[in-house]
């Protein structure tokens, strides 16, 4: 009689565990097929495969865009140097200045403003790879360019 009760209790425990496992599995299955028209495992897998293919295409597009942006960012002004100085003995203060604006490859422009009592003169020189393109850079312009390259 005791053996019968032990077997009966074991059978009820086994049935309880199987019932719990079944409902847990059913809940998991329902979350898998949520939002799928065909409520079969094949439909779920087909939908997941399509979504994965779309995601791979989107990732490839994003990688391509990032590569393009990385190439283009080298062309933007990244280094700025400002040097104030006094080129003439008859003027007071450092009112003249040189502004260098260059990209990652040290290509850009150097703008010089020379202040004198009669007015201010502006000059611009193109810079390619850290050197004057058409015109030789003055010592002050080289110093402003060096300041831009080393500080930034």
Image: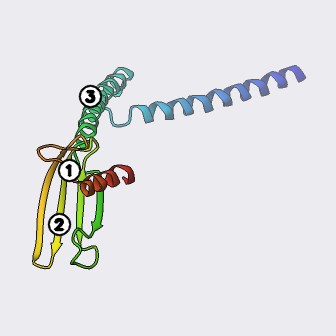
Q: Secondary structure at mark 1?
A: loop
Q: Residues within 10 Å of mark 3 (few under 14, many from 20)?
A: few
Q: Which residue is mark 3?
A: 57
What's the coloring here?
Answer: rainbow
**Which corner quadrant of the image does residue 74 belong to?**
top left
Whole-percent x, y for residue 25 in the image: 53, 29
Residue drawn at (33%, 37%) of the image: 35
Q: Residue at x 17, y 47 (%)?
A: 136
Structural distance between the alpha carbons of marks 3 and 2: 52 Å
x, y (%) of residue 3?
87, 20
Residue 121 at x, y percent in the picture? 11, 68
Q: Is residue 101 above or below residue 11?
A: below
Q: Nearer the viewer, residue 57 or 6?
A: 57
- Residue 50 higher or lower than 97, as above or below: above
Q: Secondary structure at mark 2?
A: strand
Which residue position is annotated with label 2? 113
Whole-angstrom CA distance, mark 1 to mark 3, is 50 Å
Residue occupying the far front of the picture: 89
Extreme residue in the right direction: 2
The circle on residue 137 is 1
Residue placed at 56% from the left, 33% from the top? 24
Which one is nearer the viewer's eye here, 50 or 63?
Answer: 63
* Residue 1 at least partly seen: no
| Mark positioned earlier in the residue sequence (3 or 2) | 3
Of badges 3 and 2, nearer the viewer stands 2
């Amino acid at each position: 009689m005791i053996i019968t009760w032990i077997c009966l209790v074991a059978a009820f425990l086994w049935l309880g565990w199987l019932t719990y496992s079944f409902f847990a599995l059913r809940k998991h299955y329902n979350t898998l097929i949520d939002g799928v028209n065909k409520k079969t495992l094949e439909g779920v897998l087909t939908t997941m495969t399509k979504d994965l293919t779309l995601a791979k295409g989107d990732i490839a597009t994003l990688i391509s865009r990032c590569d393009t942006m990385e190439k283009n960012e080298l062309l933007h002004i990244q280094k700025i140097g400002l040097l104030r100085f006094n080129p003439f003995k008859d003027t007071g203060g450092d009112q003249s200045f040189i502004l260098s604006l260059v990209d990652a490859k040290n290509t850009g422009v150097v703008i010089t403003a020379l202040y004198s009592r009669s007015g201010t003169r502006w000059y611009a020189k193109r810079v390619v790879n850290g050197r004057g393109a058409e015109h030789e850079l003055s010592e002050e312009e080289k110093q402003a360019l060096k300041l831009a390259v080393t500080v930034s």
